[in-house]
Amino acid sequence: MRVIMTGGGTGGHVYPAIAIADKFIERSDQCEILFVGTDRGLEKDLVPANGYPIRFVTVSGFNRKNLLKNLGVARDYLKGTRQAKKIIEDFKPDIVIGTGGYVCAPVIREAAEKGIRCYIQEQNAFPGMANKALEKYVNKVFLGFEEAGAYFKYPDKHVVTGNPVRGVFFDGNREDSRKHLEIPEDRFVLLAYGGSRGAERINRAMIEVIKRYNGARDVTIFFGTGAVYKDKVAADLEQAGIVPEDNIHIIEYLDPMETYTSAADLVVARSGAMAVSEITVCGKASILIPSPNVTGDHQTFNAKAVSDKGGAVLLKESDLTGERLFEEIDRLKNDREALDEMAAKSAGCAPKDAADIIYYTTVSDNEYGKRKIYGKETK
């Protein structure tokens, strides 16, 4: 089987695509994968680093603030469509799977016009604009959260899978991860980050948390600032008169994320779909701080899907201060029973076999469904 994976821009779109591709390779030695993305998104580095070939198309996102700039968006789309057509004709995929981002649009539409079976995977509880627009062109919509189905139009196409998470998160082991990071078994470990690019408000609040725990013998903190904010965090610490001691680890980019997550007792993070999925797969209690600057406030929907079941604390950014964040962390640190209960409920929210469901659904459709590819009917 020949599969095109398309999606990109952020890690939240790229990592699910890699997880799905890994599952296809694991399940079938006759599978060939090609990624299609842009040369500006994270996929340009992440995909090759995970051992997959990638080709690029030109596409840009709709500009809501300056409508005149959308003339360039339209021009890019036409160019990207021509490029996608050429890639599809060269590779001749059996199926195309999109995981979100504007790059999916020209690839899936071109493939659908050729009668190739197409699928999209929506990570968020509130779906993105590109996936909503593509629903009518695809055979199935794989939902990371059941709640997302209410915002699509064709319920007969929906398959609730959870979000596909890379196998390394399922394989994570707390004891081994702590040994790798040289952390004592009895230490309280806090992991905090705002996504691959960082989050200014979380970073600002973490200054107070670091101040309170700096030098504490029973606490270790791993704090991912994001590349954009690394220097700003260093300046803020200096201004606050804080010299981080050995228990404080300030890191630009947390890699490998699965090791840090497995080692943690508590995670402070944005509630992007994949962050939530990775945290719950590892069975970790969390304080989730949704970004208010996303379409449809979808990060709040993601966070509520876990917090409503008792697996996380939802802390609105409007309520976020260093003092409030410290109080929430310290309360859980000092109540092991509550922390363990939250961790167990978090694990109960985790997607267990999302990539498997996607694999078997698409393979079944491809093998037994009738389709027309390149002008030729097959079964």
Image (tube, rainbow, N blue to C red):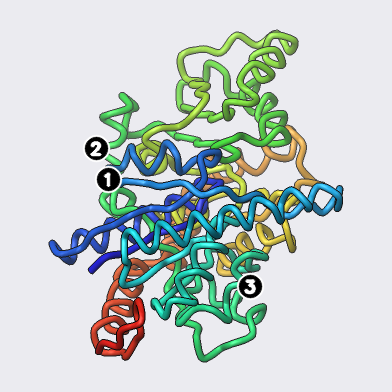
Disc 2 + disc 1, Cβ < 8 Å: yes
Percent coordinates x, y for residue 37 in the rendering: 48, 49
In the visual, does 180 lie left or right of 212? Answer: left
Where is mark 2, residue-wise? 176
The disc at residue 173 is 1
Question: Of label 3 and label 2, which has the lower sequence position?
Answer: 3
Tell me the amino acid under the disc marked 1: Asn
Q: First in sequence: mark 1 or mark 3?
A: 3
* The furthest residue to the left: 29
Q: Nearer the viewer, residue 147 or 27?
A: 27
Indicate the position of residue 266 as horizontal and vertical percent values: 50, 43
In this rendered view, identify the residue nearer to me: 54 or 307. 54
In the figure, residue 163 lies in which quadrant? bottom left
Measured Cα–Cα span from mark 3 to mark 2: 41 Å
- Circle 2 residues within 10 Å: few <14, some 14–19, many ≥20: few
Judging from the image, what secondary structure is the residue with disc 2 in? helix
Instruction: Give residue 165's mark.
Output: none
Q: CA distance from mark 1 to mark 3?
A: 37 Å
At horizontal 33% and vertical 77% (from top left) the residue drawn is 362
- Residue denoted by label 3: 132
Question: Up-down: is 78 above or below 122?
Answer: above
Q: Residues within 10 Å of mark 1 (few under 14, many from 20)?
A: some
Question: Which residue is at 49% across, 77% downward?
Answer: 113
Q: Which residue occupies 37% across, 46% down? A: 54
Question: Is residue 334 visible in the rendered structure shown here?
Answer: no
The answer to whether residue 43 is visible is yes
Say what secondary structure mark 1 lies in.
Answer: loop
Q: How many marks?
A: 3
- The image quarter containing residue 235 is top right
